[in-house]
Amino acid sequence: MALSPLTIEPLGDACLVVRFGTGIDAATSRAVAAATASLAAAALPGVVDIAPTFNTVAVVFDPLRADPGHLSAAIQARLRSLEGAAPATGAIVEIPVAYGGDDGPDLAAVAAYARLDPEEVVRLHAAADHVVGMIGFAPGFPYLLGLPAALAIPRRATPRTCVPAGSVAIAERQTGIYPRTSPGGWHVIGRTPRAMFDADRDPPALLRAGDLVRFVPVASPTSAGEGSR
């Protein structure tokens, strides 16, 4: 696995940011996921949290227990040990989705924008492999890379004030799944019964950066069980 070029730079006096270029793509996401897992397993002294994004890993440390220079060197050494390793693969997670109707109120608008039939929008979306680029916005909200170019669409001109939990929505070249009812500006094309976040579950978030998501069309959100991870 290629983990370079990368840079490590300070963010304040208690965080180092490891940067994997500026790209937002599946390969970079997998490199970030591999680095995150490796650094977590290393349990470097003084590190209190590790947070991945699309192309960075933030390593938060206790400045009373870790020297940033020594920690930076330890991070570099740890990541160099991953060079040439087989590409990391996350879990494969199937997500049942009821597309269209009340569950996907924007499906028709997306189809019109893409100049496709709604059925073709569903087929393209469900046939694609979606990689979790990062978790953000709300606990458990996945930013999924891999939306087919034919379905790329700008965000809604007017965001909704209330998007139901479980809504599957698209914008630009990404898919997101709302873990709880909240405002949102993406186009809602379906809904899933699977809980994206459960504080009583370990881990609480269903998905992690680097996971591969496959959407499975179902008749209604209640017609599918929890599925498989």
Image: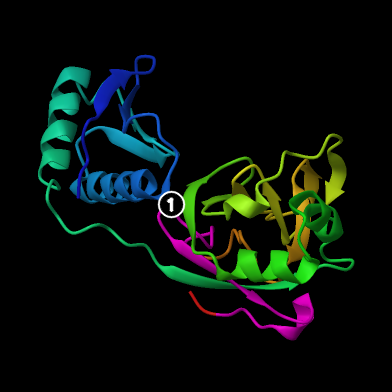
Helix, strand or loop at disc 1? loop
Q: The disc labelled 1 sits on which kind of residue?
A: Ala
Image point 80% across, 40% down: which residue? 156
The spot of residue 154 in percent (x, y) is 72, 39
Of residue 198 and residue 95, the one placed in the foreground of this image is 95
Q: Residues within 10 Å of mark 1 (few under 14, many from 20)?
A: many
Of residue 181 and residue 49, the one placed in the foreground of this image is 181
The spot of residue 101 in percent (x, y) is 88, 68
Up-down: is 201 above or below 65?
A: below
Left or right: residue 57 versus residue 216 is: left
Q: Is residue 164 visible?
A: no
What secondary structure predominates along the stretch shown in magenta? loop
Residue extending farthest to the top is 12
Of residue 87 and residue 60, the one placed in the foreground of this image is 87
Left or right: residue 90 versus residue 163 is: left
Q: Please name the residue that numbered disc 1 is placed on.
A: 209
Figure label count:
1
Image point 62% across, 66% down: which residue? 124
Residue extending farthest to the front is 115
Image point 40% across, 67% down: which residue? 91
The spot of residue 93 in percent (x, y) is 49, 70
Q: Which residues are magenta?
A: 202-227
Q: Is residue 143 visible?
A: yes
What kind of colouring is applied to the model shown? Answer: rainbow
Q: Quadrant of residue 88?
A: bottom left
Of residue 202 and residue 25, the one placed in the foreground of this image is 25
The spot of residue 10 in percent (x, y) is 32, 17
Up-down: is 214 above or below 38?
A: below
Image point 19% across, 50% down: which residue? 1
